[in-house]
Image (cartoon, helix red, strand yellow):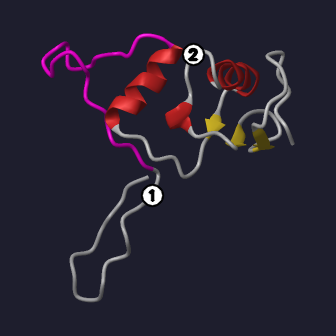
Amino acid sequence: MLCPSRHGSSSVRTTPLHPRFGVEIYGVDLRAVTAEKGYPEIREAFEAHSLLLFRGQQLDDDTHQALGSLFGPIEDRTMGKSGPKPPMDIMTNRLPMAPSPGSMRFSRSI
């Protein structure tokens, strides 16, 4: 489905992730998003759905910072110790690969 937008027609396609919130967005290269191009539709989708999923994006730290800053100031949790650009944290929901037989076992608390 196309993401309806008051900013004109959009090639952004969405698929609901949950009946009440969240969409997966297709057709957007986040490296090319600017305040004028793409961001208004992304922001509108965020306000409407609260959670946006963009699969397969390849962002370096500078591009990630630039995209994030479109939403507002970037929080610097290092209190300036890392210089003018706060470092990007690596976040994932993927578990490590299963250990091979005889190797160290992984444990995980839930």
In this picture, residue 44 sits left or right of residue 84: right
- Label 1 to label 2: alpha-carbon separation: 31 Å
Q: Is residue 2 above or below residue 42?
A: below
Q: Residue 35 has which mark?
A: 2
User: Which residue, as the protein is rendered here, is positioned at the far left?
Assistant: 81
Residue 34: x and y in percent read 55, 22
Kind of residue sitting beneath label 1: Arg
Kind of residue sitting beneath label 2: Ala
Q: Residue 61 has which mark?
A: none
Span of residues in magenta:
72-92
Residue that numbered label 1 is attached to: 94
| Depth check, front residue: 88 or 9 | 9
Residue drawn where x is 67% and y is 24% of the image:
46
Q: Quadrant of residue 53?
A: top right
User: Which residue, as the protein is rendered here, is positioned at the far bottom?
Assistant: 101
In this picture, residue 67 sits left or right of residue 1: left
Residue 30: x and y in percent read 54, 36
Q: Quadrant of the N terminus?
A: top right
Circle 2 Cα neighbour tier, 10 Å, few/some/many (<14 / 14–19 / ≥20): few
Residue 66: x and y in percent read 42, 23
**What secondary structure prevails in the magenta region?**
loop
Residue drawn where x is 30% and y is 68% of the image:
106
| Depth check, front residue: 22 or 85 | 85
Closer to the chain start, of discs 1 and 2, is 2
In this picture, residue 78 sits left or right of residue 95: left
